[in-house]
Image: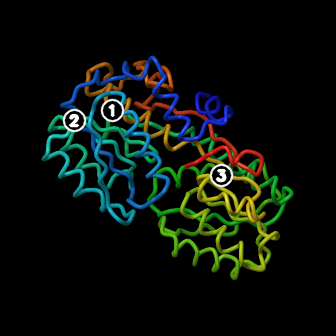
Amino acid sequence: MKFTSVVTAGTAVVLALGLAACSGGGGEGGGGGDDDVAITMLPKNLGNPYFEASTAGAQEAAGELGVAVDEVGPDAASPDAQVPFINTAAQQGVSALVVSANDPTAIGDALEEARSAGTKVVTFDSDTEPQFRDLFVNQASAEGIADKQLELIAEQIGGAGEIAILSASANATNQNAWIALMEEKLASDYPDIELVETVYGDDDDQTSFDKTAALLQSHPDLKGIVSPTTVGIAAAARYVSTSEYKGKVAVTGLGTPNQMREYVEDGTVEAFALWNPTDLGYLATQAAAALVAGDITGAEGDTFEAGRLGEYTVGADGEVLLGEPFVYDASNIADFDF
């Protein structure tokens, strides 16, 4: 619920930075202002606005904590692309790795070697198998994310009709968990909505754009597209916005306000959801610093202060939950800048 309270107050990223400067707890999160603490931020891929926002949050936390954060990563999100960056970070002796995993197991061996060398590992956004990391900072519960996306598409297509899913890569842990839950919920709670196809745009703009075109051509009765990835939803909206399908096919899912603003304002997209990725990167960095400082071990029940976000408790399997998804629409999208 922390995320909801921040967002409903109309907090944009710029304002959040200002609040952080005023927060009395910011310097008390793990890390204790140790200039020797070096944290490497490893997103799924570089050049992705979502991860640019999360890295901005990581750098905000680093400034408060007096630690160093560097971002590295591959150009494309693929299962093995992150391994060389993990190996390099471990060889450099970084204090902690903060990783959004492209695959739950492909980077496992590299992470185990890094941990053996003394590097703490925090996954965020997309998890590995639990044995490969110390903590997972989850943006929201998988159930909450799946439920919210189905609520949105059901509202927008009148509760009936054909829909498709445009996902990221076929190996993305978080995407697959959400899709599996959506499939279950569709079968039990939305009998008049049919999922006709799930396709993968590999978190690439052009690929996602082309997959959208193919979906609409293959399914002439399609009523909606759900894209649980920020790259995919923007590409789908861009295609629909200049096509005959505008106003006829709903597009929703998970996106950032800056990416989606023009499509909300021109009527292509009615509403979409997300958490605050800046807060996610901020929380992951606070958690990593707490691990490095020895304030927590990652055990269930551990608690730590996360600056302006307040106190968090580690749950089962080393999971820390940021909050619940938030819906962006024409009534509030102007309040946000990320």
The local crowd at label 2, few if under 14, some if 14 to 19, many if 20 or more residues have their Cα within 10 Å, is: many
Give the mark nearest the N terminus, 3 or 1.
Answer: 3
Residue situated in front as seen by the camera: 295 or 25: 25
Q: Element type at marker 2?
A: loop
Give the answer, above or below, for where 130 lies relative to 239. Answer: above
Whole-number angstrom distance, CA of label 2 to CA of label 1: 9 Å
Give the mark nearest the N terminus, 2 or 1.
Answer: 2
Q: Which residue is mark 2?
A: 95
Count the numbered circles shown: 3
Give the answer, above or below, for where 47 lies relative to 50. Answer: below
The local crowd at label 1, few if under 14, some if 14 to 19, many if 20 or more residues have their Cα within 10 Å, is: many
Q: Element type at marker 1?
A: helix
Whole-number angstrom distance, CA of label 3 to CA of label 2: 38 Å
Q: Which residue is mark 3?
A: 182
The location of residue 192, given as percent across then percent down, is 83, 58
Whole-number angstrom distance, CA of label 3 to CA of label 1: 31 Å
- Amino acid tagged 1: Ala
Q: Which image quadrant is residue 294 in?
A: top left
Which residue is located at x 16 percent, y 38 percent?
116
